[in-house]
Amino acid sequence: MSMRDAADGFGRQEAPSAAVAADPAPDWWIYRGVSEPHDGIRDLPPPPPWRSFADRTQEHARSDPQGMSATDGEHARPDGTRGAAPYLAEREEIHLVNMALLLRRPLLVTGPPGVGKTTLAYSIARELKLGPVLRWSVSSRTTLREGQYEYDAIGRLQDVGLRGRFIDPRAQTGAETPEPEPPDIGHYLRLGPLGTALLPWRVPRVLLIDEIDKSDVDFPNDLLHVFEEGEFTVLELARLRQHLTRVMTADSDGWAELTRGQVRCHNFPVVVMTSNGERDFPPAFLRRCIRLEIRRPDRRKLFRLLAAHLPDLDAASSSACATLVDEFLRRQEQDGSELANDQLLNAVRVAQQVWNDPGERAMVVDHLLRPLNEG
């Protein structure tokens, strides 16, 4: 076969696609699969409330080193708080959150994916004006040290070497060249989410330890020791034996002063640990936590959830809501499907645009309500 024949054959195979592309495009499409660039992005509707980033305040506010009080050793709270999505807490959940606050105990939140475990932490931080949430995502390789602090020893050594490469004028006259001074260690040491939460803030910070059930088997007990003591030592600073050291924090552009390398809390942080229930925890760990189980929402709560996130639903959209809620619950209860609440929110959001087209309705259900446990 010649190259021209192959090219002609390829062109014939593409003809059906061209015919499909020539079909009228739905009004809500922004990307249309055409070859010519266009300005359709200007017609993009506003984002769903749970995906809007334009009106949130600064995610990580600056920690002013002058906020350290000379009398009480406390930090001023940063001003920025990430906008939290509405969390519809049940009465029992509110009780347990308040128990954890009263007892200064970690809150272990268990439940299937997508029921709002993470959202609860942001809801607490926003309602109580506790500043940006310090989020620590856990994996099987996570260590306690990563949450406490990170020290870039290699970067510091490289900077020492770079300083030594500059030619000192005294070297040309035979004078002894002094050794370059090592750069300030504080520029290479950053407190992690746990370390930042344990600083002596005037009001507690919210520390979210996400998916703790994915951690190594020893991680919960390691974490428990720090929670019981409310402090830890930065070993690299302790060896220097200098009184005050200014180090970076987990907040963007945040700095804090440590005395002899000690990180010691004044108010125990509001600790929210989430778990998908994939493992058991040791009794010593559990007895020091307030345990909260978030169950799958029923029909009433799902409608409350939709009303909170999509308050502008019209009559046609309300009909789509009822159908999608029923299908959402049917798949969970009868088929054993794992579905997250935000899948329903996404489905209703798209259904507002396409519900009058039976073919597009089917695509909404098939793709946006696809079970998480389906391969």
Image: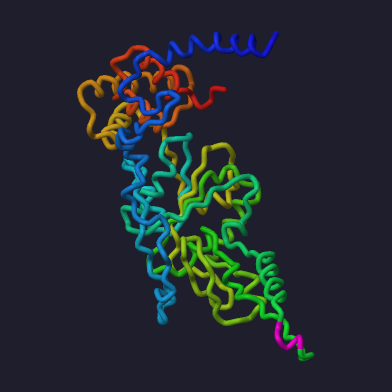
Let me know if residue 171 is in the magenta part: yes
Which residue is depicted at the point 59% across and 41% down? Answer: 280
Instruction: Give the total number of marks visible in the rendering.
Output: 0
Let me know if residue 62 is in the magenta part: no
Q: Is residue 277 visible?
A: yes
Question: Which of 230/370 is in front?
Answer: 370
Residue 49 x %, y %: 32, 39
Quarter of the picture containing the C terminus is top right
Residue 122 x %, y %: 39, 49
Give above or below for 81 relative to 84: below
In the image, the segment drawn in magenta is: 168-172
Question: Which of 152/1 is in front?
Answer: 1
Residue sitting farthest toward the left? 315
Quarter of the picture containing the N terminus is top right
Residue 304 x %, y %: 28, 33
Residue 233 x %, y %: 60, 70
Which residue is depicted at the point 52% across and 67% down? Answer: 248
Which residue is depicted at the point 22% across and 32% down? Answer: 312
Q: What colour scheme does the image use?
A: rainbow
Q: Taken as a whole, is the magenta stretch helix, strand or loop? A: helix
Asked whether, in this view, residue 70 is left or right of residue 88, the answer is right
Asked whether, in this view, residue 248 is left or right of residue 349, the answer is right
Residue 239 image-quadrant placement: bottom right
Which residue is depicted at the point 37% across and 19% down? Answer: 327
Question: Which of 326/236 is in front?
Answer: 236
Q: Is residue 106 visible?
A: no
